[in-house]
Amino acid sequence: MPSLLASRHIACYDARQFSASHPMSGKQLEKTYEPKQVEDRWYRFWIEQGSFHAPLDHPGQPYTIVIPPPNVTGSLHIGHALNNTIQDILIRWRRMQGRNALWVPGMDHAGIATQNVVERQLTAEGSSREQVGREQFVERVWKWKTQSGGTIIQQLKRLGASCDWSRERFTMDEGLSKAVREVFVRLHEDGLIYRGERLINWCPRCLTALSDIEVEHEEAKGKLYHIRYPLVDDPNTVLIVATTRPETMLGDTAVAVHPDDPRYQQLIGKKVRLPLTTREIPIVGDAILVDLEFGTGAVKITPAHDFNDFEAGERHKLPRISIFDDHARMAPFGLANAQVEESVRGKILQLPVKNARSMVVEALQEQGLLVKTEDHKMSLGKCYRCKTVVEPYLSPQWFVKIKPLADPAIKAVEDGRIKITPAGWKNNYLGWMRDIKDWCISRQIWWGHQIPAWYCRKCNGKVLVSTKPDGTWIIPKEAKPIVAKIRPTSCPTCNGSDLIQDSDVLDTWFSSALWPFSTLGWPEQTADLKKFYPTSTLVTGLDILFFWVARMIMMGLKFMGDVPFRDVYIHALVRDVEGQKMSKSKGNIVDPLHVMEQYGTDALRFTLASMASPGRDIKLAEERIEGYRNFANKIWNAARFILMNLDGPRETVPPKDRPFADRWILSRLNRTIREVTVSLEQYRFDQAASRLYQFIWHEYCDWYLEMIKPVLSRVEGPTLQSKDSVEAKRTKQTLVETFETVQRLLHPFMPFITEEIWQTLPHHGESIVTRPYPTAEPGWDAQDVESEFAVLEQFVATARTGRSLLNYQPGKVIATYGTATDHAELAILQKLSTHLSHLSKATVQLQPVAQWPAQNVLRLIIGGLTVGATVEGDVDLRKALERIKKQREEKTKEASRIEGKLGNTEFTAKAPSEVVAEHKLRLLAILQEQDLLASSERQLQEMMK
Ligand SMILES: [Zn+2]
Ligand SMILES: [Zn+2]
């Protein structure tokens, strides 16, 4: 792979000197821009050139991004497109700035999602995961991964992602798996991994845990039972509790009421006697669990048998009493723990749920504790394989003790070692981290990193492994320097060798939490790790700030002793044009692949960048993409115009010696370079895109190219020594310089079209990808020229307003008059009169109004300028009047809309000050335009008399 350094010093290439293998060999720009013919060609060229590779010996300061690894099952959606466009803009920009830019790509093994894909295949073949067994199943998943996984990688390439593909990683590859085991072992040694109880979905028929997506929910008819719970202090007072599952009440460990409920407030802290048992349980106040409006306002808390109750139990530190066995039958041990009355216990022991329920209801009735029974619709979770009702079931799991990891991660954001942009999300992060719960890291599936913990069959033969406490597990010690072969060989208690590995795997987020350092080679101390860690920027959506970003920060600090990245940039979510979430069922999905096919990749990228303003949502309208496709076409047409005008000699002179239009565009370009760079530094992709669009479309194409057309069209002969010829040569030089600079400035946003155009322009280097990003040139600034241009622009705009009010054909040259109250302004108009005529399509006479014809000149006054447009014979004055009326109405509407906004204190208080200022300026401009229209209306009415 050629190094970047080499390509930097390659001699000047001119447009027509390519080697035969070069993508531009023998090429001119086609008549219209055809993205499809361009994109693939350049992407392959970049790969062949090694343009995206970050060599270790690059002298630049590293700039590193690790990709949020997409699922191996994934396909590019619009959220990915936004996320990766932003990363690519940053990487391309920094690379061009001379940084050693590394974008590390890769994929996530996506435990459950991937396992489901292969399970569905097996089902179709009439087989199942259980039938093939774990080992073969996992082999099957790997085979699927090799053959069909990773479609998304091809799609990212299509998007133009300039990742260093030589460093692509996968969360289950050998290196990353080693990192996962190392982290598990070290956390365990530090006392940060433990066994704890957690509710899981359990199928009592299949005897397996189910993930959330393996539970099918359906509506069912049930009953709501109202039960009396007598107060311990005062058995005549009862709390009435409503439940659909009376049999689980035996496992209640509290009753909850709303803390603001005047009926029960005074009872909080007191106790009730739990019916059918000898236990007393507390009354707690819980605003999350209790809905003031629903039922009786009192609910039972059964932490071992309900997910919400489990959480409530956590909040109030309640004990958990599980009353079922693996088959969801009333377990002897459970009933003993629950202290169920002897008479009841004998009737329900070993009964399955359904039968136990009627026995419990019967017993309540006998004791006069059942108030009433009502019909009730409820949602039932069923096993996706056997349709048995799924039970929330208490089961031991592996946990990470999180507080010791969270504290340093809080500090790193508080003290600014990690900066979150937009800053508003910092408090969300801190709030969440301060309230963080221990992390349950085990999952009862087969595809993933199997937990490196073993137990001895001889010592634990009779105990079900799922119920085993932490102490009986054999977890290897950290083997310095790294855990290579981690499997323990013998039991430390009996020295036996019949060891069984825990069948659970780790949560997918466990491996992705290590991503910023595991992808660079950790636990080995690789050169990559030393060079590129900490990484620079993490680009992510808000939805995984806690699942992923927070955990990377914790793990990076713990295992690398430093933050994993300096900046976190959080982008908004892409929604449809009405602000609704995109979904298949709503049919409002914008498919990025379809968009790229139809409008070109650059148009999609520019759209996403232009909409990436700080906030929660992006409302994506397809018309916008179309608009930026037109932008690409505009640039393309400009390129064709410029290329047609580059023949003949060019002359380089200092900017100050160049013609007015050239000096102006150089100065504007300088300003644009500064603004775009500052916007990128602040992650304001929207502002950068907007500036680029304004500059290229309006300033460059509409004004500059228009202004220089007469210069370029002047015929040059070999003997011509005139001023015109000198001007043309200098303008051609400016044209090349500015347009080549514009391509580099735009490249990170629209990589394909800029490369295609840049290659046809005179340039240095092999590819625009590795050319320097433009920086402001001190000699280009010309404030005086910009001020003069402002006068010219005002005059031309006013003259054009006159033309359009009178409805002249665009090509028709009319007589125009002009004057200015300010002497300096008048002098500017005189100096620029050739431009005035050309741009206004008019003969322009600059003289005091008194010397203008007395009749048939429409005088348009704006600021200190007065422009006169002749009203010639064929102008229909009545129609002109109508146009003016219509325009005035529109202006009035617009003015009142803006006035309304500015009068709204919520807007003025919340909107950024620059937005408010823009609104005020716009309002001023409208008021001026209204004056102008009113005066024109009066004049036309006079003329019609
Ligand atoms: Zn089942
Ligand atoms: Zn043993």
Image (cartoon, rainbow, N blue to C red):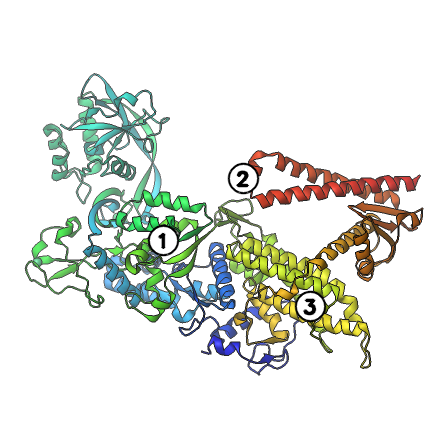
Horizontal side, residue 404 vs residue 942: left or right = left
Q: Nearer the viewer, mark 1 or mark 2?
A: 2
Q: Secondary structure at mark 1?
A: helix
Badge 1 is on which residue? Answer: 548
Q: Nearer the viewer, mark 1 or mark 3?
A: 3
Residue type highlighted by circle 3: Pro
Whether residue 858 can be seen here: yes
Badge 3 is on which residue? Answer: 655
Residue type highlighted by circle 2: Lys
**x and y percentages locating residue 404 in the rendered image:** 26, 49
Q: Residue at x 51, y 51 (%)?
A: 589
Q: Quadrant of the N terminus?
A: bottom left
Horizontal side, residue 606 vs residue 926: left or right = left
Res. 313 image quadrant: top left
Badge 2 is on which residue? Answer: 910
**x and y percentages locating residue 660 in the rendered image:** 74, 64
Q: Nearer the viewer, mark 3 or mark 2?
A: 3
Disc nearer the start of the sequence (3/2): 3
Horizontal side, residue 176 vs residue 101: left or right = left
